[in-house]
Amino acid sequence: MRKIPTRKLLLGVAIIILGWYGSQTMPIDSPASAGDQPAAAQGKTLANNLIAAVTTTRTDPYVPTGTGPLQLAVRSKTAGCQINGSLPDPLCTPGAVFAAATPDQICQKGYSRSVRSVSVSLKKRVYQEYGLTYPQPTGSYEVDHLIPLELGGSNDIANLFPEAATPTPGFREKDVVENYLHGEMCEGTIDLARAQEQIATDWTVVYDHITPTQRAALLQQFRSWAD
């Protein structure tokens, strides 16, 4: 039997809990509705705690808090950056966010477009730090935000890396995760800081727990958005 890594198992349980509590509805006039609210809140707290447990296994400079505002490591490397599978070099790209961005702002249609600002000179710098020439063949790479704009990520170079399309999961698959977490956050299922924490820690773990049907729908949604 294939052993499931602890981090994947914990995150899988968290997603199941979030999905179950999110599916529970009570009639408006039901006398039990008010009493059920604490249980739903407890479910959300449990799921977020499991997510925090997933992130504590990380050994690079990422510093998860579990609760409260997100804390990210300071960028400490500007050359010789190395891609690690589907993930950026954590010393070069620890992630960065717009600290003042709120869920209400982020969930407004057109938000990502309004804050996107990555110049050609900045893209060239990102490629150079990772030892790549600029530009690469169309469709092979893109300069991606580790924490996406749609989750409050910033345009700072600490949040940018050259992400390949292949091998998979690549930048198209990461788009699926971004849409998934954006939807969960905007629905109030998961806190903004925890969504940022998930994708900055290891977005491929989240991708592994999204069903093929969900992936197809989320990718189509991404293509239909005008960011």
Image (cartoon, rainbow, N blue to C red):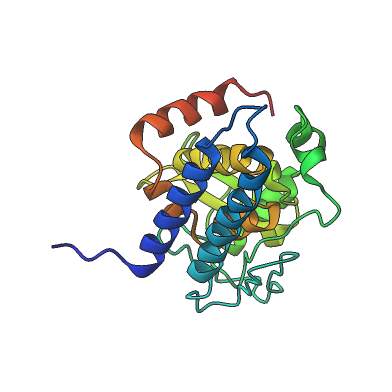
Front position in the image: 165 or 55: 55
Q: Is residue 146 visible to the viewer in this orientation of the structure?
A: no
In the rendered structure, the answer to whether residue 184 lies left or right of residue 220 reads right
Quadrant where the C terminus is found in the figure: top right
User: Does 224 sit above or below residue 96?
Assistant: above
Direction right: furthest residue: 100
Q: Which residue is drawn at 66% across and 51% down?
A: 124
Q: Which residue is drawn at 53% across and 75% down?
A: 56
User: Does 38 sit above or below residue 95?
Assistant: above
- Toward which corner of the image does residue 185 lie, by quadrant? top right
| Residue 116 percent coordinates (x, y) | 76, 39
Q: Is residue 66 visible to the viewer in this orientation of the structure?
A: yes
Quadrant where the N terminus is found in the figure: bottom left
| Residue 178 percent coordinates (x, y) | 57, 42
| Residue 2 percent coordinates (x, y) | 18, 62
Direction left: furthest residue: 1
Front position in the image: 24 or 179: 24
Front position in the image: 19 or 221: 19
Direction front: furthest residue: 31
